[in-house]
Image (cartoon, rainbow, N blue to C red):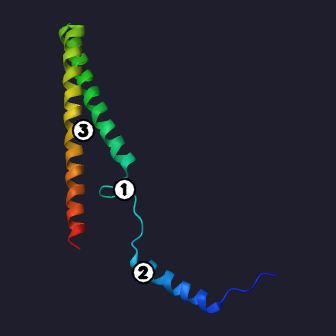
């Protein structure tokens, strides 16, 4: 038959585990201000698509108004794409800055 575990060793192991649990911080996912990386990625995709859709909508509306169907649609869709990329890059810069500030704050502890 299997021998019973030593109660003194088990008690010592439980004490060591309790000390480690007290000192260890709970594991956090890689996030920026509570947002997961998937949420950040979706935010950037939505910013890009929103810029493009606004540009396409404005271009199409002006083309219908002025009767120059493909010209302004193409121009404003390119401008909308550029605006979406600019907004997306600005968000990425801000998130990187926030993460760097948080990391610098964590190092000071």
Circle 2 Cα neighbour tier, 10 Å, few/some/many (<14 / 14–19 / ≥20): few
Looking at the image, which residue is at 21% across and 21% down?
A: 78
Q: Nearer the viewer, residue 70 or 106?
A: 106
Dividing the image into 4 quarters, which one contains the C terminus?
bottom left
Where on the picture, by quarter, is residue 34?
Answer: bottom left
The vertical placement of 31 against 72, above or below, is below
Front tag of 3 and 1: 1
Identify the residue position indicated by label 1 in the image.
Answer: 30
Q: Position of residue 105 (x, y in %)?
A: 21, 66
From the image, tell me which residue sits under label 2. Answer: 22
The spot of residue 14 in percent (x, y) is: 55, 84
Q: Secondary structure at mark 1?
A: loop
Mark 1 Cα within 10 Å, few/some/many (few <14, many 20+)? few
- The one nearer the camera, 109 or 74, is 109
At label 3, counting other C-alpha atoms closer than 10 Å, the crowd grade (few under 14, some 14-19, many 20 or more) is: many
Q: Residue furthest right?
A: 1
Residue under the point 23% across and 33% down: 85
The residue to which callout 3 is attached is 88
């Amino acid at each position: 038959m299997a021998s019973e575990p030593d109660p003194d060793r088990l008690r010592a192991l439980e004490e060591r585990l309790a000390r480690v649990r007290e000192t260890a911080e709970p594991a956090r996912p890689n996030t920026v201000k509570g947002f997961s990386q998937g949420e950040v990625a979706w935010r950037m995709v939505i910013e890009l698509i929103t810029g493009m859709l606004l540009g396409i909508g404005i271009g199409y509306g002006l083309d219908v108004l002025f009767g120059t169907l493909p010209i302004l649609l193409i121009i404003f869709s390119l401008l909308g794409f550029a605006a979406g990329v600019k907004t997306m890059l600005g968000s990425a810069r801000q998130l990187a800055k926030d993460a760097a500030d948080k990391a610098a704050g964590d190092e000071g502890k």
